[in-house]
Image (spheres, grey):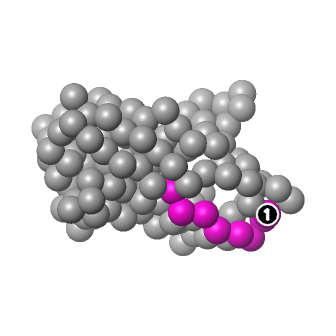
């Protein structure tokens, strides 16, 4: 069982930056691929970014490519999402998730952290 706790959300002006963190406990952190997802009010949850177990491979939604960077520190059991050039459309609750090896689905989810971008 893996527990995930996000932090780093807040209110920022358009064009600003935030770095989200997601700390994991209760499992072998390096055994999981990790992802960030977001859900805006009235919308479905959408994929933002993912990173492989080693950190050597990453993937991004087209809407955040070139602005967001996902990274992980397996020694600290933490995954990060650096968000630059934020836009009001990035406003959402951001959640991290862990996908076990040999699984195609994310099994563990954090509670989420609110990111609000003002215009």
- Tell me where residue 11 appears, x and y as whole percent: 74, 54
Please tell me how crowded label 1 is: few (under 14), some (14-19), or many (20+) other residues with Cα within 10 Å: some
Magenta residue check for 7: no
Residue at (51% x, 56% y) in the render: 20
Q: As rendered, which of 63 and 38 lies closer to the eye?
A: 38
Residue placed under numbered mark 1 in the picture: 13
Element marked by disc 1: strand
Residue at (59% x, 57% y) in the render: 63
Residue 114 in view of the camera: yes
- Tell me where residue 61 appears, x and y as whole percent: 50, 54
- Tell me where residue 67 appears, x and y as whole percent: 57, 69
- Tell me where residue 99 appears, x and y as whole percent: 26, 39
Residue 47 in view of the camera: no
Residue at (33% x, 55% y) in the render: 78
Q: As rendered, which of 104 and 72 lies closer to the eye?
A: 72
Q: Which residues are magenta?
A: 13-20
Residue at (61% x, 40% y) in the render: 93
Picture quarter with the N terminus: top left
Left/right of residue 28 with respect to residue 18 in the rendered view: left
The image quarter containing residue 97 is: top left
In the rendered image, the vertical position of residue 108 relative to residue 18, given as above or below: above
Magenta residue check for 17: yes
């Amino acid at each position: 069982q893996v527990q995930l706790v996000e932090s780093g959300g807040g209110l920022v002006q358009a064009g600003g930056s935030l770095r989200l963190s997601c700390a994991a406990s209760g499992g072998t952190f390096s055994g999981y691929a990790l992802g960030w997802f977001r859900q805006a009010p009235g919308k479905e949850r959408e994929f933002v970014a993912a990173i492989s177990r080693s950190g050597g491979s990453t993937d991004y939604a087209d809407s955040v490519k070139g602005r967001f960077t996902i990274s992980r520190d397996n020694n600290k059991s933490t995954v990060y999402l650096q968000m630059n050039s934020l836009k009001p459309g990035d406003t959402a609750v951001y959640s991290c998730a862990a996908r076990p090896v040999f699984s195609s689905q994310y099994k563990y989810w954090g509670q989420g952290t609110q990111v609000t971008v003002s215009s």
